[in-house]
Image (tube, helix red, strand yellow):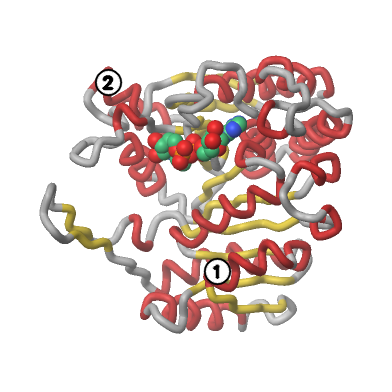
Amino acid sequence: MKASIAVLPGDGIGPEVISKAVEVLSKVAGKYGHEFKFTEAPMGGNAIDSTGQALPDATLKLCEQSDAILLGAVGGPQWDGPTATVRPEHGLLKLRKHFDLFANLRPVKAYPALAQHTPLRADLLEGVDMLFIRELTGGIYFGPRAEQGDSDSAYDTEVYSVPEVERVAHVAFRAAQGRGKKLASIDKFNILASSRLWRRAVVRVHEDYPEVELEHILVDACTMHLLVRPASFDVIVASNMFGDILTDEASVLAGSLGMLPSASLGSGAFGLYEPIHGTAPDIAGQGKANPTGTILSTAMLLRYTLGLENEAQAVEQAVEKVLADGARTADIAPRGGSYISTDEFAGAILAQI
Ligand code: NAD
């Protein structure tokens, strides 16, 4: 199979983890007889510095001509000032909106090899394997806002329409159908009008998937349920902001924020693949970044955009084997224990593929 992949390394640890993901995809291509063409382009803070735009037109054009986008992460303190008018994350939001990538899939798995590393009891982590589906192109991240420099007030608006909720709910119910047939829908029904609309739309879509068991959970309660009964979750669907926050919390179950991949999909096969973490300025350039989330994002790219299930599983199994063999980056090493660099860890995964 031939595929063109736009590679946007981004800022901070982005280029460090993306280079490893490209090596993994190249290895898969060589082993299974595929031809993947990678083209790099600036996005985020580095693009602001070089072009004044977070998402330069040429980068957007490259993405339009590609089958998928592989992205590191964008942002950093040098572009985060409160009065900055062009922000790195504007590029990311624009990219998601431009391609109407409304469903962000974030699988969260607890690896037995890392159970001792998390702050939770190992028995609570047994069997933890859930799929978050975060709505990605609506809600408070895109609603009307007033941000008036130094004035005394500002606002952001959570806006959802029924069709926006229904389409992401369909993705979630379909995913649940193919897994454990359980869906948890997260909202703040008791307080927010937008959440009452969310729940009404999800209940409507449930009529099309009667075999899926649906549970509604208030977002504040969900933060607690994720820690006390994580193994009971199968698929979870949430709004843009609730999904963003809950998946960072859920990353603790996997051992580190650096472990989690994501796929942002629209109605076709095109997708944007990125780890859920940010640019980690505190460890950038030190060889300490965990490339697992980005490497597992390539497995999602192989699965969802290219339909290469065997290849996707080969990458996932390589990651599991390396973890089971005891290889650790700094973030998942036992306290005071030894760890290997980003390059060495990725090298071990490559050797397994
Ligand atoms: P972060 O995810 O970058 O880092 C949070 C903590 O997790 C840090 O201690 C970091 O060292 C650690 N961490 C993250 N990824 C890791 C990895 N792969 N390996 C090992 N440790 C890892 O979040 P933050 O510090 O709140 O944000 C830093 C910058 O990233 C900000 O500018 C923010 O806007 C940006 N950001 C970007 C994205 C994105 O591009 N999708 C997402 C979140 C944050």
**Label 1: how many Cα within 10 Å (few below 14, some 14–19, many 20+):** many
Pointer 1 or 2: first along the chain? 2
| Amino acid type, mark 2 | Asp
Q: Is residue 115 left or right of residue 304?
A: right
Mark 2 — residue?
Answer: 49
Q: In this view, does 108 lie to the left or right of 219?
A: right
Instruction: Using the image, determine if residue 303 lies above or below residue 212.
Output: above
Work out which residue is located at the far front of the displayed protein and give it. 336
- On the question of residue 61 being in view, the answer is no
Which dot, 1 or 2, sits closer to the camera?
2
Q: Residue at x 63, y 54 (%)?
A: 250
Instruction: Using the image, determine if residue 150 lies above or below residue 9.
Output: below
Q: Residue at x 67, y 71 (%)?
A: 183
Residue at disc 2, secondary structure: helix
Mark 1 — residue?
Answer: 169
Instruction: Using the image, determine if residue 97 lies above or below residue 17.
Output: below
- On the question of residue 336 being in view, the answer is yes
Question: Quick one: 178 or 256, which is closer to the camera?
Answer: 256
Work out which quarter of the rendered image holds the N terminus and state it.
top right
